[in-house]
Amino acid sequence: MRDFSWTYFAMTGDVESFLLYKEVDQVREAGSAEAAAAAEAAAQEAADEAAWGTLTV
């Protein structure tokens, strides 16, 4: 959808297609940020579990 909206904008100069392009781009970036945060949380949880597993009582 992103590539199509850019191509359509480039061919026609239609402002609505440019706005759609920007919206899709923002959604993609937000998804990447959420995925990175989830991966970081998972890595921290795995590190915490590993640390607790090495403790002796």
Image (cartoon, grey):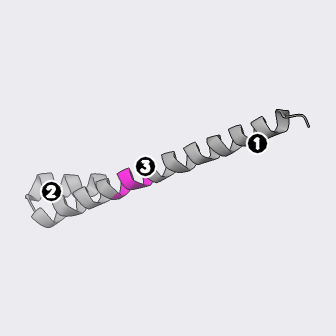
Mark 3 residue type: Ala
Q: Nearer the viewer, mark 1 or mark 2?
A: 1
Q: Nearer the viewer, mark 3 or mark 1?
A: 1
| Magenta stretch in the rendered image | 27-31
Q: Residue at x 63, y 46 (%)?
A: 42
In-image side of 41 versus 54 (left or right): left
Residue 56: which quarter of the image? top right
Disc 3: which residue: 33
In terms of secondary structure, where does tag 1 sit? helix
Residue 30 on the magenta span = yes
The numbered dot on residue 9 is 2
In terms of secondary structure, where does tag 2 sit? helix
Do the CB atoms of the residues marked 3 and 1 lie less than 8 Å apart? Answer: no
Tell which of 14 and 41 is nearer to you. Answer: 41
Residue 15: which quarter of the image? bottom left
Mark 1 residue type: Glu
Q: CA distance from mark 3 to mark 1?
A: 24 Å
Q: Residue at x 57, y 45 (%)?
A: 39
Disc 1: which residue: 49
What is the number of callouts on the image?
3
Q: Earlier in the sequence, mark 3 or mark 2?
A: 2
Decide: few, some or many residues near mark 1? Use Cα within 10 Å; few <14, some 14-19, many ≥20.
few
Q: CA distance from mark 1 to mark 2?
A: 50 Å
Mark 2 residue type: Phe
Q: Residue at x 91, y 37 (%)?
A: 57
x, y (%) of residue 17?
A: 18, 63
